Image: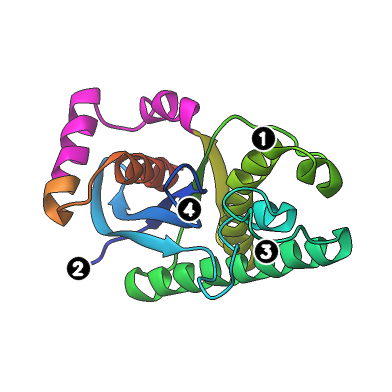
């Protein structure tokens, strides 16, 4: 069956509470924007599980929770660790995108969901603030996916989650059709079909229309 254009929506997860982070939910849609079909949904690994702290690179450098039993790294070593994790996460994201493209065809768009945009300060300032470490790690995995998509010449865009409803209203379907289609997607692929998957699907749909 000819599916036409293919788009992927990605919602990354940084560590929070008991959630280890370092991964992303993704949904792949194909076809026309007025009648999309769901091709896949899954989980994209974005940190090297063999490297302690790669899911929270800034916390690992500063040796803050949950790494309080380790010693903080000196700045030079810490900067190298962050760079190592950056390269690893981009490589993992690139491999995941390549696998999606191989299975479903060339990607028209990769849409990465984001929160409020906050310019980050230099690394020294990030490491001096536990709050900024969390902010930086949320952006870290989003940036890894964007960089991997750009490297593979896939059109990539970030969309704020708060902006997604307004963009969804521009899709060439009615609100009722949009809601029904998302419910159908969930029934077709089965669980998990929670907020991560629903938002990633909507982002992919916007990319398909895009």
Highlighted range, magenta: 161-184
Mark drawn on residue 1: 2
Q: Look at 49% across and 27% down and name the residue there.
A: 163
Residue 152, image quadrant = bottom right
Q: Are marks 2 and 4 in contact (CB under 8 Å)?
A: no
Secondary structure of residue under mark 1: helix
Q: Main secondary structure of the magenta part?
A: helix
Secondary structure of residue under mark 3: helix
For marks 3 and 4, the one nearer the N-term is 4
Q: CA distance from mark 2 to mark 1?
A: 49 Å
Residue located beneath label 1 in the image:
131
Which quadrant holds the N terminus? bottom left
Q: CA distance from mark 2 to mark 4?
A: 36 Å
For marks 3 and 2, the one nearer the N-term is 2
Mark drawn on residue 21: 4
Secondary structure of residue under mark 4: loop
Q: Look at 80% across and 41% down and name the residue there.
A: 128
For marks 2 and 4, the one nearer the N-term is 2
Q: Foreground mark, 3 or 4?
A: 4
For marks 3 and 1, the one nearer the N-term is 3
Mark drawn on residue 151: none
Residue 26, image quadrant = bottom left
Q: Foreground mark, 2 or 4?
A: 4
Can you name the residue that lies furthest to the front here? 69
Q: Are marks 3 and 1 in contact (CB under 8 Å)?
A: no
Q: Foreground mark, 3 or 2?
A: 3
Q: CA distance from mark 3 to mark 2?
A: 38 Å
Residue located beneath label 3 in the image:
86
Magenta span contains residue 168: yes
């Amino acid at each position: 069956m000819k599916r036409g254009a293919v788009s992927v929506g990605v919602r990354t997860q940084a560590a929070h509470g008991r959630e280890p982070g370092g991964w992303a939910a993704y949904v792949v849609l194909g076809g026309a924007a007025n009648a999309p079909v769901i091709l896949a949904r899954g989980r994209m690994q974005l940190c090297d599980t063999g490297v302690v702290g790669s899911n929270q690179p800034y916390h690992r450098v500063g040796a803050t929770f949950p790494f309080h039993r380790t010693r903080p790294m000196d700045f030079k070593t810490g900067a190298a660790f962050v760079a190592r994790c950056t390269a690893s996460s981009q490589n993992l994201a690139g491999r995941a995108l390549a696998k999606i493209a191989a299975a479903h065809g060339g990607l028209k768009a990769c849409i990465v969901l984001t929160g409020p945009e906050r310019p980050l300060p230099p690394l020294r300032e990030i490491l001096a603030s536990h709050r900024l470490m969390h902010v930086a790690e949320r952006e870290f995995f989003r940036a890894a996916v964007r960089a991997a998509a750009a490297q593979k010449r896939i059109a990539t865009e970030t969309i704020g989650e708060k902006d997604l409803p307004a963009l969804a209203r521009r899709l060439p379907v009615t609100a009722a059709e949009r809601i029904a289609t998302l419910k159908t997607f969930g029934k077709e692929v089965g669980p998990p079909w929670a907020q991560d998957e629903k938002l990633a699907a909507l982002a992919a749909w916007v990319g398909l229309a895009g």
